[in-house]
Image (cartoon, rainbow, N blue to C red):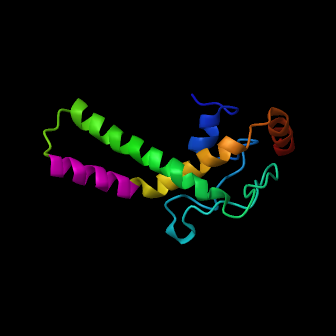
């Protein structure tokens, strides 16, 4: 189980990097009307998510790595399930999965990028928990 205080909790749950409780995005990654828009600040602890203009441009590099990991996972799963796909079929499957996963990959990449520069603070998280009770 991934508990609060763990970077994976913040990244995969799309939560605030500092308190791990507030939402990171304006809406769900697959809501295309607000496609992967990051909130201005955490609704729970007030952390400003946008350190500077164009801060999240760096997440494009992370997105490339996450996309490669997804494509490798598709390949490994085809090998594990012993699917005899030709090269064109395997390529088509990878492209299809990547297209379907694109909103999630973009959201997780922005979350990873934010978690590189913003650290978890247990004291702030405790204050937020006390305010909510």
Residue 69 x %, y %:
41, 41
Residue 75 x %, y %:
28, 39
**The N terminus lies in quadrant:** top right
- Residue sticking out furthest to the top: 1
**The C terminus lies in quadrant:** top right
User: From where the camera sits, is residue 14 visible?
Assistant: no
> Bounds of the magenta span?
87-100
Asked whether, in this view, residue 29 is left or right of residue 132, the answer is left
Vertical side of 74 occupied by 96: above or below: below
Asked whether, in this view, residue 114 is left or right of residue 63, the answer is right
Q: Examine the structure image and report whether residue 89 is included in the region drawn in magenta.
A: yes
Residue 62 x %, y %:
53, 48
Q: 50 and 29: which one is in front?
A: 50
Exactly how many numbered labels are in the figure?
A: 0
User: From where the camera sits, is residue 117 visible?
Assistant: yes
Q: Residue at x 53, y 55 (%)?
A: 60
Q: Residue at x 59, y 54 (%)?
A: 58
Residue 106 x %, y %:
51, 55
Q: Examine the structure image and report whether residue 75 is included in the region drawn in magenta.
A: no
- Residue sticking out furthest to the bottom: 33
Asked whether, in this view, residue 27 is left or right of residue 64, the answer is right
Vertical side of 37 occupied by 104: above or below: above
Q: Residue at x 86, y 44 (%)?
A: 131
Q: 3 and 106: which one is in front?
A: 106
Q: What secondary structure is the magenta-colored segment mainly?
A: helix
């Amino acid at each position: 189980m991934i508990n609060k205080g763990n970077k994976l909790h913040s990244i995969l749950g799309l939560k605030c990097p500092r308190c791990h409780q507030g939402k990171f995005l304006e809406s769900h990654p697959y809501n295309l009307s607000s496609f992967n828009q990051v909130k201005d600040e955490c609704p729970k602890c007030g952390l400003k998510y946008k350190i500077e203009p164009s801060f999240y441009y760096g997440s494009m590099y992370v997105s490339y790595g996450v996309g490669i990991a997804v494509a490798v996972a598709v390949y490994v799963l085809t090998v594990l399930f012993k699917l005899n796909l030709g090269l064109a079929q395997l390529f088509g499957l990878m492209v299809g999965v990547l297209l379907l996963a694109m909103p999630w990959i973009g959201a997780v990449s922005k979350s990873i990028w934010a978690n590189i520069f913003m650290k978890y603070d247990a004291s702030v998280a405790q204050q937020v928990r006390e305010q909510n009770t």
